[in-house]
């Protein structure tokens, strides 16, 4: 899979892509991530990428021309399954969306910054808009990083134990059950006996029950989703 990320401040994202599971996936060539700095696509002398909003109001708006140039160059080189814009005024990311994006060959992710982008970018280039929650970040970069992490860990070969992504919270619309490791008794706090019983059907039934209990308690809304 190839991911192209367009941003006014790509350096904000470098560390998360240079660490841990995502870095390993890149090193193993399971995913190819390219950062594009919008300033490299300006044609004006001052490398200006934003301007005041028509009609007045606070904040600056990312201009259409550098974004058009960057997206057009990318699209001329290959086909993209989705061109995604990270913005708080969009449907909220969930596991289903990450699962389906993990099946794509090539995607572009555009990060908003300042007040956002010229609406014509959204109307003419973007095929999908994603928010990571009902709060406002300073830009889409951290949101894009979250989205990429959730996609990349699903790619075949990225996680050591192939089944481990399947048992994550939200797969099957359930939160994950509690997990424990050694020691089985810490200061008198005991691990549930069933987990050390060696009875795997019973352990599985216990986990399913706990997952359902936790979901009912914490996120009952998930149980009504398809
Ligand atoms: N940009 C700013 N806030 C955001 C959010 N909550 N989700 C996605 N992109 C954003």
Image (cartoon, helix red, strand yellow):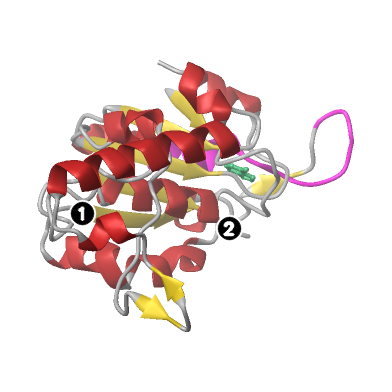
- Residue at the disc numbered 1: 32
Counting from the top left corner in percent of width and height, residue 2 is at 22, 45
- Mark count: 2
Q: What residue lies at 10% left-to-right and 63% top-to-bottom?
A: 28
* Ligand 1: image quarter: top right
Span shown in magenta: 54-70
CB of residue at label 2: within 8 Å of ligand 1?
no
Question: Which quarter shows the C terminus?
Answer: top left
Q: Is residue 56 left or right of residue 209?
A: right
Read off the residue under disc 2.
47
Question: Is residue 73 among the parts visible in the rendering?
Answer: no
Query: At 53% across and 31% down in the image, what residue appears?
Result: 216
**Which residue shows up at 27% across the image and 50% down it?**
152
| C-alpha span from label 2 to label 1 | 27 Å
Q: Position of residue 193 (x, y in %)?
A: 31, 60
Q: Secondary structure at mark 2?
A: loop
> In the image, is residue 164 above or below residue 70?
below
Q: Secondary structure at mark 1?
A: strand
* Residue nearer the viewer, 223 or 108: 223
Give the answer, above or below, for where 9 lies relative to 89. Answer: below
75 left or right, relative to 145: left
Is the CB of the residue bearing disc 1 within 8 angstroms of ligand 1?
no
Outermost bottom residue: 187
CB contact under 8 Å: marks 2 and 1: no
Quarter containing the N terminus: top left
């Amino acid at each position: 899979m190839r991911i192209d990320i367009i941003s006014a401040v790509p350096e904000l994202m470098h560390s998360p892509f240079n660490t841990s599971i995502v870095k390993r996936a890149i090193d193993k060539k399971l995913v190819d991530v390219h950062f594009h700095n919008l300033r490299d696509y300006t044609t004006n002398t001052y490398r200006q990428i934003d301007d005041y909003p028509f009609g007045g109001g606070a904040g600056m708006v990312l201009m259409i021309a550098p974004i058009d140039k960057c997206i057009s160059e990318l699209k001329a080189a290959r086909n993209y399954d989705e061109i995604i814009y990270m913005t708080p005024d969009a449907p909220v990311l969930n596991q289903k969306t990450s699962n389906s994006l993990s099946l794509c060959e090539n995607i572009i992710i555009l990060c908003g910054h300042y007040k956002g982008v010229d609406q014509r970018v959204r109307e003419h280039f973007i095929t999908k808009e994603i928010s990571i929650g009902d709060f406002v970040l300073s830009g889409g970069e951290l949101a894009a990083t979250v989205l990429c992490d959730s996609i990349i860990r699903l790619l075949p070969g990225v996680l050591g134990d192939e089944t481990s992504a399947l048992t994550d919270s939200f797969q099957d619309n359930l939160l994950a059950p509690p997990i424990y490791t050694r020691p089985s008794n810490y200061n008198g706090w005991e691990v549930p006996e069933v987990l050390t019983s060696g009875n795997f059907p019973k352990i599985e039934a216990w986990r399913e029950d706990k997952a359902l209990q936790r979901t009912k308690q914490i996120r009952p809304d998930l149980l009504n989703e398809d």
